């Protein structure tokens, strides 16, 4: 039987892991050990076959890293991304992402995760963000999470929530005026709109830009 301390020393650098990774490290590993260790509080179950160590609760932004690991492909967008960029005033309760998979909701000790489905041609406009440094042994360079560019997060929102189609509804977004007027990359926004090629989305976007005197 695999010893927990040995197991932890090998898997902790992974941040979060699956039963398949555990078996790759330990060929004789008994998956029932995961159930026992979870019941004892030595592991946290993230979703079916995904686990993390409790120490990861203290890692800055680790919850965001998990979002892209337990449901792939996906990238953080929508309200969460807008909040990260300071484009909306309120904090967001759940971590919101878009994916080419079916819409899903996942909850674990790290938080609530909401995934919205988009078509393949909408799945672009994001960048890798490196997880903040921890002890070198538990922070491999490849630990990154994917975040929409602010312009794409805005378009994802207008695409997935089509009721934002008039001035009154758009004002309810409470987008930061300074950001919209001084930091939003209009060239990137227009490039993304052209790439998407959705007339309804373009119409809603133009209404939003007019609201901030950007067109």
Image: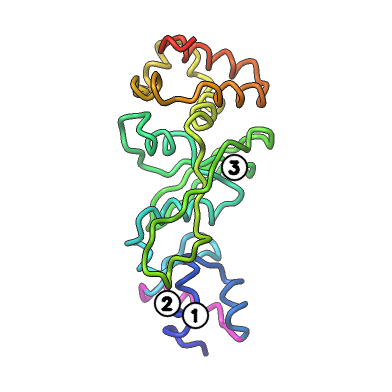
Q: Which residue is mark 1?
A: 33
| SS at mark 2 in the image | helix
The residue drawn where x is 53% and y is 17% is 205
Q: In this image, 196 relative to 208: left or right? A: right
Colouring convention used in this rendered image of the protein: rainbow
State which tag comes first along the sequence, 3 or 2.
2
Give the spatial CA distance, label 3 vs label 1. 32 Å
Residue at 39% across, 53% down: 61
Mark seen at residue 37: 2
- CB atoms at circles 3 and 1 under 8 Å apart? no
Q: CA distance from mark 1 to mark 2?
A: 6 Å
Residue denoted by label 3: 99
Which residue is rendered at x = 64% and y = 33% of the image?
122
Q: Quadrant of residue 196?
A: top right
- Tell me where residue 100 appears, x and y as whole percent: 64, 42
Queried whether the magenta region covers residue 37, the answer comes back as yes
Within 10 Å of disc 2 (Cα), the crowding (few <14, some 14-19, many 20+) is: some
Q: Is residue 151 above or below residue 10?
A: above
Please give left or right for residue 11 compared with residue 27 in the image.
Answer: left
Residue 162 percent location from the top left of the image: 54, 21
Q: Counting other residues with Cα less than 10 Å from the Cα at mark 3, is it few (<14), some (14-19), or many (20 or more)?
A: many
Position of residue 3 measured from the top left corner of the image (x, y, whole percent)? 46, 88
Q: Are marks 1 and 2 in contact (CB under 8 Å)?
A: yes
Q: Does residue 17 lie above or below 132 as drawn?
A: below
């Amino acid at each position: 039987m695999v010893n927990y301390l040995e197991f932890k020393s090998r898997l902790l650098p992974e941040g979060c892991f699956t039963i398949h990774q555990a078996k790759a490290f330990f060929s004789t590993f008994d998956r029932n050990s995961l159930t026992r260790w979870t019941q004892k509080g030595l592991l946290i179950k993230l979703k079916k076959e995904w686990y993390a160590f409790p120490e990861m609760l203290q890692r800055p932004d680790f919850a965001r890293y998990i979002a892209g690991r337990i449901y792939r492909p996906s990238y953080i967008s929508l309200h969460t991304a807008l909040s990260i960029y300071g484009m909306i005033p309120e904090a967001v309760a759940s971590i919101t992402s878009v994916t080419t998979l079916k819409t899903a909701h996942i909850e674990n000790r790290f938080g609530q995760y909401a995934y919205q489905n988009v078509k393949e041609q909408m799945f672009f406009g994001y960048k890798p963000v490196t997880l903040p440094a921890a002890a070198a042994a538990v922070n491999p360079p490849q630990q990154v999470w994917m975040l929409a560019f602010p312009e794409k997060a805005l378009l994802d929102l207008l695409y997935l929530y089509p009721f934002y189609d008039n001035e009154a509804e758009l004002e309810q977004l409470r987008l930061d005026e300074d950001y919209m007027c001084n930091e939003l990359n209009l060239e990137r926004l227009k490039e993304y709109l052209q790439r998407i090629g959705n007339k309804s989305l373009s119409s809603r976007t133009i209404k939003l830009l007019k609201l901030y005197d950007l067109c």
